Image (tube, grey):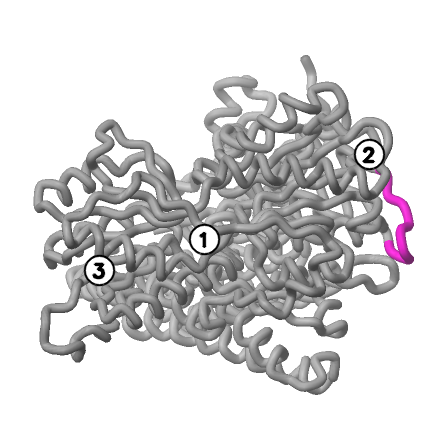
Amino acid sequence: MTTTPRLRALTQHHLFWPVAVLVVLLLINVPFTPDFFSIKMTDGHLYGSLVSIVLFGSPLILVAVGMTLVIATGGIDLSVGAVVAITGALTCSYISDQSDQGALAGVFLAMGIGLVAAVVCGLWNGFLVARMGIQPIIATLIIMVAGRGVAQLITDGQIITINSEPYKLIGGGYWLTLPFSIFVVAAVVAVTVALTRKTALGLLVESVGGNAEASRLVGIRSRRIKIMCYVFCALCAGIAGLMISSNTSAADGNNAGLWIELDAILAVVIGGTSLLGGRFSIGGTVVGALVIQTLTTTIYTIGVPTQTNLVFKAAVVIVVCLLQSPKFRAKVFGNKFGPGKRTKGGDTTSTAPADAAPTTTAAPKMEVS
Amino acid sequence: MLNRRNFLTAAVGVAAATGLAACAKEDDSSSGSTSGGSKAIVLGFSQVGSESGWRSANTDSVKSAAKEAGYTLKFSDAQQKQENQISAIRSYITQGVDVIAFSPVVVTGWDAVLKEAKAKKIPVVLTDRSVETSDESLYVTLVGSDFTDEGRRAGKILEKVIAKAGLKGDVKIAQLEGTTGAAPAIERAKGFKEVMDADHADDWKIVVSQTGDFTRAGGKQVMAAFLQSNPDINVLFAHNDDMGIGAIQAIEAAGKKPGKDILIVTIDGVKDGFIAMSEGKINAIVECNPLLGPQLMEVVQKVKNGETVERWIKTKEGDFMQDQAAAALPTRKY
C-alpha cells in the first residue's frame, strides 16, 4: 500500500491519534443512541449529547489544562481534586449565608474568596516544590489528603444547597444558547495558549521541565516559573470547583472533584504530553479531556453493566495508550503509522513540537534528563 | 536526579502527610469521663464517611446518643475507604475499647479484622449496613434498615404513584444505583426487582440502570446520558434522594417536567428530598431512618452486660407520598 505524503503528514501530527480516538468513541454511540449527534433547541438553549459532553467535561478540561503546565515543568499536582472541593465549599457556604443569595455582589465576592483560597493552595504547593525541593508528588499529596478534610470542615460535613440564579450560570446555565461553561473554558484555554505560545513563557516552562538546573544556569528563574505553574493549576482547579458546585447548586465537600486529579493526568497523557516534563500540548490536553468525558458518557448510554464500568474504562484507556505509542504502532501496523524520523536523544514520545502556533515550532527540542 | 537531600525531604513529607491523614479525622469526645466515677463504656465507632445529608444526620445521632448515655465515643470517619475503616477498627482493638460499632463501606472483606476483634473478645455491632462473613459469630447484631424491604416498598409505592398519575401503557424505568458493591445499592435493586418480577413482569421494564455513586453530580450526569439514549423513560427510581435531586436538574435541562413527564421515586427522606417533593418534583419517598443512635446505645449496653440481642434490630421507617410532603417537611431533622 502506498501512502501519500499528505496522509503520512496527517498521521504524524501530534493530535492525530487523540482526535482519532475521540471520533471513534463518538461513533460508537450512534448505534445505541441514533440521534447522538443531533442538537435541538429546548427551553431557549441547545440540547443534545454533544452539548452534555462539553458541559459535564468542562471542569475536567480546566483542571487538565492547569495540570499540563505543571507536568510540563516535570511536576505533578495531586491536590486539584481537594482544591475543587475547597473552592466549592467556601463559595457555596458564603453564598448560603447571604440574605439575598441572588445578589450579584455577594456572588462575585463568594467566588473571589473561593478562588483566593485556590491560589493560596497553589502557592503552598509551589513553595514546597520549588523552594523546599520536595518531590511534587509528595508536596501536593499533603493538600490532596488534608484539603478534603478542610472542605468538610467548611461545609460541616453537610451538602450545602444554595439557590442562587447568578451563581447557577457559571456551571449549569446557558448564554447565547450554549452552556456558559463552554465560554469560560474557551477563555481559559485561549489565555493559556496565548501566554505560552505567543510569548516566551511556554518555551521557558518547557526549558524548566527539560532541565531545571540548566535553565537556571542560563538565567531562567526556574523556581518562579514552577511556582507560577502550580498557582495557575490551582486557579484552574478553583474555577472548575466553582463550575462543579454551580452545576448542582450544591457544595459536596466529600465528593466534589473526587479522583479528578487522576482523570486530569490521564487527559494530559492522552493529549501527548510526557509525564517526564518538557514539551506540552494544550490542544492535546483538551482533546484528551474530551476523550475521557466521552468515554464516561458512552458507558452510560451503551448500557455497560455497572460492575464492569471500570474494567471497560481501563480497557479503552489501554487501547488509547497503545495507539499513542510509536513502538506499538510500528510493530502492529508496520512502517505506515510507525515513528517517523526519530530524534537521537532518548526522546520516547512521538509528539511533534507541541501545539500549532508557528512561532514556536522552531523551538529547540528539549532533552529529558 | 534524586540526590540525598531531596530524598530526605521527600521522606519527611511522606511522614507529615500520613501523620495528617491519621489524625485529621480522629475525634475523641470523652463525654463520659464525668459520669459518676464509674468506668464509662468505651465505644469505638467507624463511620463510612460523610457522603450525604443522611450520613451526617446518622453521625450526629450516634454522637449525641453516646453523650446522653454517658459513653466515651471514639469516632472516626473512613472517607468511603475500606482500608481506612479496617485500620480504624484495628486501632480500636489495640486501644481495647469495650464495644466496636461500624457502618461497613462495602459488603465483603471483613473476616480478617473481625476475627482479630473476636480474638480480643471485643463484641462488634454493625450499624446501618450489613456484611457477608464466613462466620456468623463475628458480629453480634446489626442495627439498621432493611434495604431489601426499602426496595420492595419503593416498588409498592411506585404502583400507587403510577395509579395516581394515571400513567397508561408500558412503564419504562430508569434506575440510578448507589455505589457499586455497597449493600444499600445491591439490596434496594433486589427488593425493587422482586416486586417488579412478582406483580409487573409484563408492564414494567427497567430500560437503563447505572451507578450514580449516591451523589447529586453523579445522578445529574448519568440521567443526562439516559435521557439521550432513552428519551421515552417515564419513571425514575433513584437509590437515594441526592441522586434524584441531581437527576431532576438533568430532566429540567432536557425540557421535561420532573414529577409529571417522569415520575420519580427515591429512598432516604433527607430534607432536600422533601423540599423537592413539596415542589412536586419527586412523587414519593421511601424513608430510611438515620437516627439510630439511641437504639445503638441501648444495644451496646445490652451487649456489654452480656445479654442476648436479636441478630437484626430494624429501624422504624415510613413511606411518604407527595401530598404528605408539605406536612412532613418541618419535622425533617436532616
Provide the residue span drawn in magenta: A38-45
Q: Nearer the viewer, mark 1 or mark 3?
A: 3
Q: Could you tell which of marks 2 and 3 lies nearer the N-terminus?
A: 3
Measuring 50% from the left and 73% from the top, which residue is drawn there? A118
Say what amino acid the circle numbered 2 marks. Asp
Residue A274, compared with residue B66, is above or below; it is above
Q: Is residue A65 left or right of residue A206?
A: right
Is residue A354 in view?
Answer: no
Occupied quadrant, residue B130: top left
> Is residue B94 shown in magenta?
no
| Pointer 1 residue | A366
* Identity, as a three-letter code, of the amino acid under mark 3: Leu
Q: Label 3, secondary structure: give it.
A: strand
SS at circle 1: loop
Question: Residue B108: image x %, image y %?
Answer: 33, 34
Image quadrant containing the N terminus of chain A: top right
- The residue that label 2 is drawn on is B232
Label 3 Cα neighbours within 10 Å, binned few <14 / some 14-19 / many ≥20? many
Q: Is residue B76 left or right of residue A156?
A: left
Q: Which residue is tagged 3?
A: B43
How far from the left and from the top, in percent, is residue B158?
Answer: 70, 39
Q: Height in image: B301 above or below A39?
A: below
> Residue at (52%, 50%) from the top-left corner?
B317
Question: How far from the left and from the top, in percent, is residue A271?
Answer: 57, 45
